[in-house]
Image (cartoon, rainbow, N blue to C red):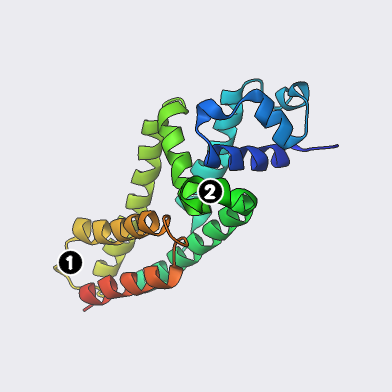
Amino acid sequence: MKTNREEILQHALRLFMTLNYERVSLQLITRTVGLTKTGIFNYYPTKLDLFVAVADKYLFSAQHPEHKFEASDGTLADFLEKYLRGVARTMELLVALGRLDEDAMPGGTVNAGYFHLFEQVLRYYPDGKRKLQTLMHAEYDLWREAVRRGVRCGELRAETDIEEAVALFRQVFVGLSYESSFGDGLDIGALERRFRTIYHLLKR
């Protein structure tokens, strides 16, 4: 059986979304992937190397604003549309990759499994906390610039508190994502309605 690097990472992603890092044994990895230890170690010399590669691809790269969102035309309204589109696209990719093992995942959904991966990164990824914080700061910066542009061009009220507006948008997204992970997963329509509500409160 010929298995490439991408297939190894996809199988490993499902394992790390389903199980704690300690329980993902080398034997389980080889059995799931369908390669010998030597075959896998040609790509990833240790389990930690494999875990880091999974997190780099499916968390840090997939969630980085530069890879997740299209450039907007400068208005907050357009930014919201592009943001929602990017979230939906990323979520569809992850759900498609994780669906085969969905029943085994914490909470029984891919979304819950993905939050589980974040928790594993905090514990086992070298300097994972700092790297996650850097990722979150990059997204806050993206929101901050979008809201600031909206104020500058007169789309939003001049007295808009930029930091509070950014926190509202970002925390509604994170909160709804987390809450939804215990059910059927994030409802993009619900997220859009909440974004629109905040937008209309800020709009001139």
**The residue under label 1 is which amino acid type?**
Thr
Instruction: Check disc 2 and report the residue beneath it.
Output: 62
Instruction: Inspect this view and state whether residue 150 appears.
Output: yes
Quadrant for residue 127, please give it.
Answer: top left
Q: Nearer the viewer, residue 123 or 80?
A: 123
Examine the rendered structure and indicate whether residue 31 appears above or below residue 202.
Answer: above
Instruction: Check disc 1 and report the residue beneath it.
Output: 160
Quadrant for residue 156, please give it.
Answer: bottom left
Quadrant for residue 81, please give it.
Answer: bottom left
Mark found first going from the N terminus, 2 or 1:
2
- Mark 2 Cα shell of 10 Å, populated few (<14), some (14-19), many (≥20): some
Where residue 118 appears, as percent x and y from the top left, is: 44, 40
Instruction: Inspect this view and state whether residue 155 appears.
Output: no
Q: Is disc 2 placed on a helix, strand or loop?
A: loop
Q: CA distance from mark 2 to mark 1?
A: 31 Å
| Left or right for 149, reference 117 | left
| Left or right for 84, reference 153 | right
Q: Which residue is located at x 53 percent, y 52 percent? A: 110
Tag 2 and tag 1, C-beta contact below 8 Å: no
Q: Is disc 1 placed on a helix, strand or loop?
A: loop
Where residue 43 appears, as percent x and y from the top left, is: 71, 27
